[in-house]
């Protein structure tokens, strides 16, 4: 264990330096950066496919996609008419240096809002500051009501928790009240939304909250 700390500490310190640089850089360009984190398959790309058209005409957007392999998610984003850059990495998380390189690809015409879809993983992405303005944890209700308590870090550090796939609640055996109470225990300050990215239920409230945060970040 002591060996692990010795290796991780300098890695995280270096990452924090890159993240601080990113934060300054994004602020100087007026870019609001939204880091979306979740376990694999919770619905990050689907949420983006639905959210981006709702922001069209209001903000210019771009998306950085993180996956171990394929550019399938970037292709899905491009199909809704939004620029996307795919990162493939063997890591279980994105780090600030990767984000710096990916964000640079949009700089000919900097977006007002840059979304980052992190690698599907409910643990590691929580440890890596990317220089983002807003952290979002997306959680699929079918993963179970106990998970916020078992994997608290990501929930605790997020500005917003989006509970997705509410259309599956009747088949899941999960009590929404119990899940909400566990989210509240772990993350009392976060904004919490219950949505179905599939049916569209709850998305208007999430998008309004997001737009208000973007305005705040961009100083309006
Ligand atoms: N029933 C239902 N299915 C959903 C919902 N949102 C996403 N899905 C489905 O869940 C599966 C995974 O969705 P993705 O959007 O690919 O999830 P992801 O988090 O981007 O996955 P990774 O990038 O691989 O981590 C797909 O089959 C989606 O159609 C929802 O609200 N309800
Ligand atoms: Mg995805």
Image (cartoon, rainbow, N blue to C red):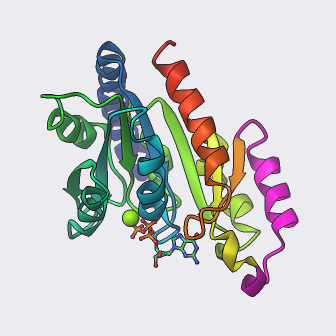
- Residue drawn at (45%, 64%), measured in percent from left and top? 46
Q: Main secondary structure of the magenta part?
A: helix
Q: 35 left or right of 18?
A: right
Picture coordinates of residue 192, whole percent (x, y): 72, 47
Question: Is residue 178 on the magenta stretch?
Answer: yes
Q: Is residue 114 above or below residue 140?
A: above
Q: Is residue 2 visible?
A: no
Observer-nearest of 130 and 140? 140
Total label count?
0
Q: Is residue 120 above or below residue 143?
A: above
Q: Quadrant of residue 18?
A: top left
Q: Is residue 37 above or below residue 141?
A: above
- Residue drawn at (31%, 37%), measured in percent from left and top? 96
Q: Quadrant of residue 62?
A: top left
Picture coordinates of residue 145, whole percent (x, y): 76, 69
Q: Is residue 26 visible?
A: yes
Q: 19 left or right of 39?
A: left
Q: 204 left or right of 105?
A: right
Picture coordinates of residue 33, whole percent (x, y): 40, 33
Observer-nearest of 215 and 25? 215
Question: Is residue 211 on the magenta stretch?
Answer: no
- Residue drawn at (23%, 28%), measured in percent from left and top? 110
- Residue drawn at (30%, 64%), measured in percent from left and top? 76
Observer-nearest of 40 and 218? 218
Query: Which segment is the magenta one?
Result: 170-190
């Amino acid at each position: 264990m002591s060996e692990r700390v010795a290796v991780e500490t300098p890695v995280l310190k270096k990452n924090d330096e890159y993240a601080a640089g990113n934060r300054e850089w994004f602020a100087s360009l007026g870019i609001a950066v939204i880091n979306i984190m979740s376990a694999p398959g919770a619905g990050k790309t689907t949420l983006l496919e639905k959210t981006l058209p709702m922001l069209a005409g209001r903000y210019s957007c771009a998306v950085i996609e993180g996956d171990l392999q394929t550019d399938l998610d970037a292709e899905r984003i491009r199909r809704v008419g939004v620029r996307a850059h795919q990162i493939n990495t063997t890591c279980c998380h994105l780090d600030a240096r990767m984000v710096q390189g990916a964000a640079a690809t949009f700089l000919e015409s900097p977006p007002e809002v840059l979304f980052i879809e992190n690698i599907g993983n409910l643990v590691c992405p929580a440890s890596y500051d990317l220089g983002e303005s807003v952290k979002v944890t997306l959680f699929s209700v079918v993963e179970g009501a106990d998970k916020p308590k078992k994997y608290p870090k990501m929930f605790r550090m997020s500005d917003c928790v989006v509970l997705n796939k509410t259309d599956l609640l009747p088949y899941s055996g999960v009590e929404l009240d119990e899940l909400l109470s566990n989210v509240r225990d772990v993350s009392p300050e976060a904004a919490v939304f219950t949505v179905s990215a599939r049916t569209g239920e709850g998305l208007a409230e999430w998008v309004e909250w997001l737009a208000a945060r973007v305005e705040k970040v961009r100083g309006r």
